[in-house]
Image (cartoon, rainbow, N blue to C red):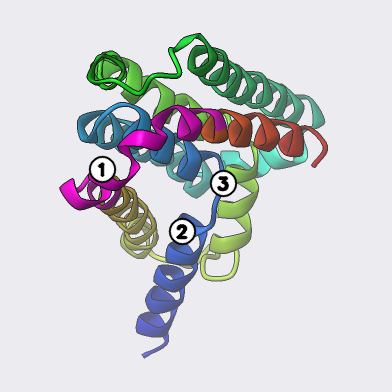
Amino acid sequence: MDELANLTAVAVVSLLAAISPGPDFFVVLRNSLSYSRKAGLMTALGVSVALLVHLTYTLVGIGVLIAESVFLYSLIKYAGVAYLFYLGASGLISSFKKSEALTLKYAKENTDISAYKAFRQGFLTNLLNPKAAVFFISLFSQFIDSTTPALLRVEYAFINWSITLSWFLFLSFLITSKGFVGKINKFRIYIDRVMGGALMFLSMKLLFI
C-alpha cells in the first residue's frame, strides 16, 4: 500500500510540475503555435529525451553533485539563461521582420522549422535548466533511500517521464487542432511576440534564482 501511495504521489507531483508554466511549457507552446503540430511534437520529444538525462544522473547520485557544486550549477544556469534569451529574442526579432499583413505566405513561412531544430530546442531548453536537478533531488529524496530496490527507482522515473511527455504531446495536439488554429491564425504575429517575450522574461527570472 505504501508503495502504491508513493507511486501515486510521484505521479501527482509530476503532473503538477509539467503543467506549471515554465521554459519547457513555453517552448512547446511557441513552436506549436508559431510553426506546426509536427514542430510542437518534436519539441516535446526533445524535452522528454533531456528529461531522461536528468532522471538518469539523479537516480545514480550525480544530481546531488550538480546541485551542491556552485561551479557546475552556475555553468548550467548561465548556459540555460543564454539559450532561453536567444530563443526568445530571435522569435521576437523575427516577428517584427514579418509583414503586418497576416497572409497565407506568413503561415507557410512559419512552418519551415525542421524536425531536428524543433527537437534540439526542446532538448536544450530542458537540459540547460539547472532547476531540474534540484527538482528531482527534492522529489525523489522523499521516496528513495539506499534500501529502495532498483526496479522501484526505475518505476518512479518512468512515471515522471511518461506523464511529462504525455502532457506536452497533449498540449501540442490541443493547440494545433483545427478549431483552435482557425481562431488564432490572425493573431500569429502577436503570439510570436508574446512567446518571445515570455522566454526572455523566463531567462531573466532564471538568472536571479
Q: Residues within 10 Å of mark 3 (few under 14, many from 20)?
A: some
- Residue kind at label 2, given as amino acid type: Ile
Q: Position of residue 151 (x, y in %)?
A: 31, 61
Q: Position of residue 57 (x, y in %)?
A: 50, 39
Reply above or below: 80 against 97. below
Reply above or below: 178 against 43. below
Dot 3 or dot 1, earlier in sequence: 3
The structure residue drawn at horizontal position 22% and vertical position 48%, both measured from the top left corner, is 173
Question: Given this view, does label 3 or label 1 mark the residue nearer the observer?
Answer: 1
Specify whether 104 is left or right of 70: left
- Residue kind at label 3, given as amino acid type: Gly
Residue occupied by mark 3: 22
Reply above or below: 179 against 11. above
The structure residue drawn at horizontal position 64% and vertical position 37%, both measured from the top left corner, is 130
Q: Position of residue 205 (x, y in %)?
A: 75, 39
The structure residue drawn at horizontal position 52% and vertical position 34%, both measured from the top left corner, is 195
Q: Which residues are magenta?
A: 173-193
Specify whether 62 is left or right of 27: right
The CA distance from mark 2 to mark 3 is: 9 Å
Residue 57 shows in the view: yes
Q: Residues within 10 Å of mark 1 (few under 14, many from 20)?
A: some
Residue 182 on the magenta segment:
yes
The CA distance from mark 3 to mark 1 is: 22 Å
The CA distance from mark 2 to mark 1 is: 21 Å
In the rendering, which numbered label is found on residue 19?
A: 2
Residue 128 on the magenta segment:
no
Q: Which structural element holds mark 3?
A: loop
Residue 129 shows in the view: no
Viewport quadrant of the C terminus: top right
Residue occupied by mark 1: 181
